[in-house]
């Protein structure tokens, strides 16, 4: 068997190695993405809605920034550079305006530029360029293309102004312009409107999506409650498909309840008939002369009666009982009294905090009694511990008996199974642990076996809180 498993593992490794490298990378990537994504329907639906919107907005923003915004900025920068080039040409072509008053007036009134001629001055040292500035890049390209002279620009010193200095024959021409003349400064309004409208639309979509998800979550909660034996009230709501699933669940619930009623009725009839026959046996044996053979027959009839009750209880599973809020503390105290009547010493009943749990009290009492009676049968001391965690209530029953080997602990939960050295219903039907686990699982929990702190076995019953 080990060789076969090893061969399967080697075959899987060879199949994986035989895949092309891109296929392996794609599988690993898709698996990592699947592990990182949320598992809930609501979260996945939000991703389905939000991801395309975010992607679309990103593409639009990039296109706008790369095309429209940059194009407008370049054209504005080209216009300002053309004005500066025209001023340089006028200054050098008409030297009669020695004090440049006329040129400064024309620049201020017609071109909205502030012009100064710094005679004998030199260009400042180049300063650090901004990390990301469309204006610097566009303005530099236009000056190099149109003016083709040494220059110096400052676009960050004063936020609302830009300064351009160009070397001329006898000094430096300094031109100051408003930043809006060379830069599309209102582009953020478009981005704000785009982002704001997207947030509003996403909010509306999320609200409607939540209303569509609620009926599905309600259906899941109702199905879980029905599986735990709790009384439910459910009316299908939501979209047509969700309503169809809800009606299918209601019909399934009715069929299950009818099957359970029919089974209960059949079992009641069988138990009534068999009990009548067993009662006749007991009466007949009571009327005959008592001897060793009659006593053996009486013990056989009693054993038959006990086995019949165990079989019927296992088949019935206490399915007709409704789940109600139950004080687990009082239930465990009653269990302590029942175990002490069996002759065992109950060392402690340790209950951590309040223990009000919604369950089927008779079924859980039977589950715990089966486990505690098993502990009392094979041990002298029994301890009962109950505690609550975030989602479950855990009831542990410990004993100081011989225990069960770890490799056989799952086997003893099978119906009618008895181990040579097992602690399961000596002389009984072999159904005690099976009934206990069935009851716990019907509540949405389970029963597990572990090594106990008293040196024997610990049986832990986990129930949803």
Image (cartoon, helix red, strand yellow):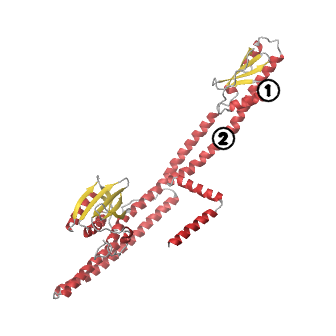
* Snapshot quadrant of residue 345: bottom left
Residue 235 lies left or right of residue 72; in this view the side is: left
Q: Secondary structure at mark 1?
A: loop
Q: Earlier in the sequence, mark 2 or mark 1?
A: 2
Q: Which one is nearer the viewer's eye here, 144 or 267?
A: 144
Residue 53: image location, x then y, percent:
60, 46
| Residue ranking furthest to the left | 289
| Residue ranking furthest to the front | 3
Q: Which one is nearer the viewer's eye here, 112 or 331?
A: 331
Say if residue 130 shows up in the picture: yes
- Residue lying at 28% horizontally and 78% vertically, measured from the top left: 272
- Residue lying at 65% horizontally and 44% vertically, measured from the top left: 59
Q: Which mark is residue 236?
A: none
- Determine which residue is flagged by label 1: 148
Badge nearest the viewer, 2 or 1 = 1
Residue 131 lies left or right of residue 437; in this view the side is: right
Q: Secondary structure at mark 2?
A: helix
Please say if 88 is above or below 78.
Answer: above
The total number of labels drawn is: 2
Q: Which one is nearer the viewer's eye here, 240 or 157?
A: 157
Q: Residues within 10 Å of mark 2 (few under 14, many from 20)?
A: few
- Determine which residue is flagged by label 2: 62
Residue 413 lies left or right of residue 78; in this view the side is: left
Is the C-beta separation of discs 2 and 1 under 8 Å?
Answer: no
Say if residue 317 shows up in the picture: no
Rounded to the nearest angstrom, the CA distance separating label 2 from label 1 is 32 Å
Residue 200: image location, x then y, percent:
55, 42
Please say if 145 is above or below 388.
Answer: above
Residue 38: image location, x then y, percent:
51, 52
């Amino acid at each position: 068997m080990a060789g076969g498993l090893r061969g399967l593992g080697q075959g899987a490794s060879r199949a994986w190695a035989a895949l092309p490298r891109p296929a392996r990378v794609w599988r690993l990537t898709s698996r990592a993405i699947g592990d990182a994504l949320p598992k809930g329907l609501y979260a996945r639906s939000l991703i389905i809605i939000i991801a395309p919107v975010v992607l679309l907005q990103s593409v639009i923003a990039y296109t706008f920034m790369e095309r429209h915004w940059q194009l407008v900025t370049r054209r504005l920068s080209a216009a300002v550079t053309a004005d500066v080039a025209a001023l340089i040409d006028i200054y050098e072509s008409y030297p009669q305006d020695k004090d440049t008053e006329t040129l400064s007036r024309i620049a201020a009134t017609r071109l909205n530029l502030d012009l100064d001629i710094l005679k004998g001055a030199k260009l400042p040292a180049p300063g650090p360029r901004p990390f990301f500035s469309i204006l610097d890049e566009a303005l530099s390209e236009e000056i190099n293309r149109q003016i083709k002279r040494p220059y110096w620009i400052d676009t960050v010193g004063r936020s609302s102004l830009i300064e351009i200095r160009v070397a001329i024959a006898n000094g430096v021409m300094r031109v100051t312009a408003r930043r809006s003349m060379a830069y599309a400064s209102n582009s953020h309004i478009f981005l704000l409107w785009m982002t704001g409208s997207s947030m509003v639309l996403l909010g509306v979509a999320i609200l409607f999506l939540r209303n569509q998800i609620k009926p599905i979550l309600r259906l899941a909660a109702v199905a879980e409650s029905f599986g735990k034996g709790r009384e439910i009230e459910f009316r299908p709501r939501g979209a047509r498909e969700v309503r169809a699933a809800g009606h299918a669940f209601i019909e399934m619930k009715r069929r299950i309840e009818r099957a359970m009623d029919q089974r209960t009725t059949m079992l009641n009839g069988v138990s009534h008939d068999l009990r009548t026959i067993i009662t006749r046996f007991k009466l007949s044996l009571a009327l005959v002369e008592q001897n060793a053979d009659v006593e053996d027959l009486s013990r056989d009839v009693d054993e038959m009666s006990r086995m019949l009750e165990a079989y019927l209880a296992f088949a019935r599973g206490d399915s007709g009982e409704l789940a109600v809020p139950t004080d687990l503390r009082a239930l465990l105290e009653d269990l302590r009294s029942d175990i002490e009547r069996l002759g065992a010493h109950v060392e402690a009943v340790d209950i951590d905090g309040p223990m009000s749990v919604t369950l089927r009290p008779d079924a859980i009492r039977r589950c715990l009694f089966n486990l505690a009676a098993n502990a009392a049968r094979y041990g002298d001391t029994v301890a009962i511990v109950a505690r609550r965690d975030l989602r479950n209530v855990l009831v542990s029953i410990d004993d100081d008996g011989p225990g069960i080997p770890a490799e056989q602990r799952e086997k003893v939960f099978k119906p009618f199974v008895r181990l040579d050295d097992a602690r399961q219903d000596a002389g009984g039907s072999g159904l005690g642990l099976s009934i206990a686990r069935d009851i716990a699982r019907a509540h949405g929990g389970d029963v597990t076996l572990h090594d106990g702190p008293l040196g024997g076995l610990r049986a832990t019953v986990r129930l949803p809180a």
